[in-house]
Image (cartoon, coloured by chain):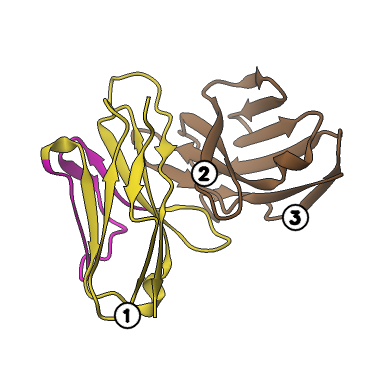
Amino acid sequence: EAGVVQSPRYKIIEKKQPVAFWCNPISGHNTLYWYLQNLGQGPELLIRYENEEAVDDSQLPKDRFSAERLKGVDSTLKIQPAELGDSAVYLCASSKGLGQGNTEAFFGQGTRLTVV
Amino acid sequence: QKEVEQNSGPLSVPEGAIASLNCTYSDRGSQSFFWYRQYSGKSPELIMSIYSNGDKEDGRFTAQLNKASQYVSLLIRDSQPSDSATYLCAVRGSGTYKYIFGTGTRLKVLA
């Protein structure tokens, strides 16, 4: 079974430029998460989807960040414009949804963003 | 008080010893508890999940949960240098699928 797939693995952009990250969750996983991880810290939730619906986006800086999960499968996270402080690793994870059994979440390889 | 707390370490143990990693959480209604291993430059990898009080063993790993004390731990027996990594504790809160992570404990297994 394929795991969570993210792209790109690395991205270097200049500040004020836009950037987008893509995630394909594990097949059959209805719940998709976007996390941000800074060096030496644990992952912090940005947004959580149940199918197409964003059910927890309270930590998403909505002035510059946006996300979508069309058709309830793949998801895209966008930053526009990027700031120096956005440099971090962006992690996507997925798990089975409500009523589907255990709730273990599995992570993709992450996208390391560097804003210069 | 942080929602999930871990000692950042580093925790150094000799090869072959037992490594004990600890985690406390603040939401008394939390239902699910997870341990992830993260090698430097890699993403978190799920190694254990535990849902009820007591011990759960999987190979060299044992997760221990005490909901009354709001405490979850991970024991690694016969520690190997390849176990050197950061171990993240994650807690799923009551009535939600939101996972809260601790900052992780860095483990060093000395050969």
Measuring from the top left, give residue A64's x and y in whole percent.
22, 70
Report the disc number at residue B10.
3
Q: Chain of mark 2?
A: B
Chain letter of mark 1 equals A
Q: Quadrant of residue B94?
A: top left
Q: Position of residue A74 (x, y in %)?
A: 21, 42
Hey, what amino acid is under mark 1?
Glu
Q: Alpha carbon of mark 2 to alpha carbon of mark 1: how far?
A: 28 Å
Give the residue displayed 69% in from the left and 26% down from the top: B61
Q: In the figure, the yellow chain has which letter?
A: A
Label 2 to label 3: alpha-carbon separation? 18 Å
Which residues lie in the magenta part?
A: A45-70
Q: Can you identify the residue that label 2 sits on?
A: B44
Local secondary structure at mark 3: loop
Between A86 and A5, the residue placed more toward the observer is: A5
The hue of chain B in the figure is brown
